Image (cartoon, rainbow, N blue to C red):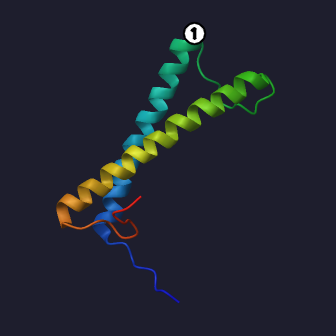
């Protein structure tokens, strides 16, 4: 059985250090884009009875795409920063697709 490589502290700090601001930025971006497109604030709780199904589904789809893209940007940025600091890829990442 292969032993799982423990992630160094540098990688953990970079990952968290970029994920948190990326999450905040993604939330602000989704709220602003929703308001610009719909003219209303996004639903605070899409599961609430007062939110229509189409509105809840649209918000879930839109915010899901933006948050996933934000996580990807943060993860790739953290990996690039780790590689430039250490000269090697973070644990668990490889060169190929």
Residue at the spot of label 1: 39
In this view, the residue farthest toward the front is: 96
Find residue 13 and report its horizontal and vertical position in percent.
Answer: 32, 60
Left/right of residue 89 with respect to residue 87 in the rendered view: right
Above or below, comparing residue 90 to residue 20 in the picture: below
Above or below, comparing residue 86 to residue 65 in the picture: below
Q: Residue at x 81, y 27 (%)?
A: 49
Q: Across the whole image, how many numbered discs are drawn on residues?
A: 1
Q: Let me know if residue 51 appears in the view.
A: no
As rendered, which of 77 and 52 lies closer to the eye? 77
Q: Residue at x 31, y 69 (%)?
A: 9
Above or below, comparing residue 5 to residue 66 in the picture: below
Q: Quadrant of the C terminus?
A: bottom left
Left/right of residue 5 with respect to residue 46 in the rendered view: left
As rendered, which of 56 and 90 lies closer to the eye? 90
Left/right of residue 6 with respect to residue 10 in the rendered view: right
Disc 1 crowd, CA 10 A, few/some/many (<14, 14-19, 20+): few
Find residue 31 and report its horizontal and vertical position in percent.
Answer: 52, 24
Q: Residue at x 32, y 66 (%)?
A: 90
Above or below, comparing residue 59 to residue 37 in the picture: below
Find residue 61 and report its horizontal and vertical position in percent.
Answer: 63, 33
Q: Residue at x 57, y 33 (%)?
A: 63
Element marked by disc 1: loop
Q: Let me know if residue 64 appears in the view.
A: yes
């Amino acid at each position: 059985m292969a032993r799982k490589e423990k992630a160094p502290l540098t990688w953990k700090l970079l990952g968290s250090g970029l994920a948190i601001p990326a999450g905040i930025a993604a939330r602000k971006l989704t709220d602003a884009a929703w308001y610009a497109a719909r003219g209303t604030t996004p639903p605070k709780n899409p599961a609430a009875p007062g939110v229509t199904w189409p509105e809840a589904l649209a918000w879930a789809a839109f915010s899901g795409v933006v948050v996933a893209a934000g996580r990807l940007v943060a993860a790739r940025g953290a990996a690039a920063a780790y590689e430039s600091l250490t000269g090697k890829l973070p644990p668990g990442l490889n060169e190929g697709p």
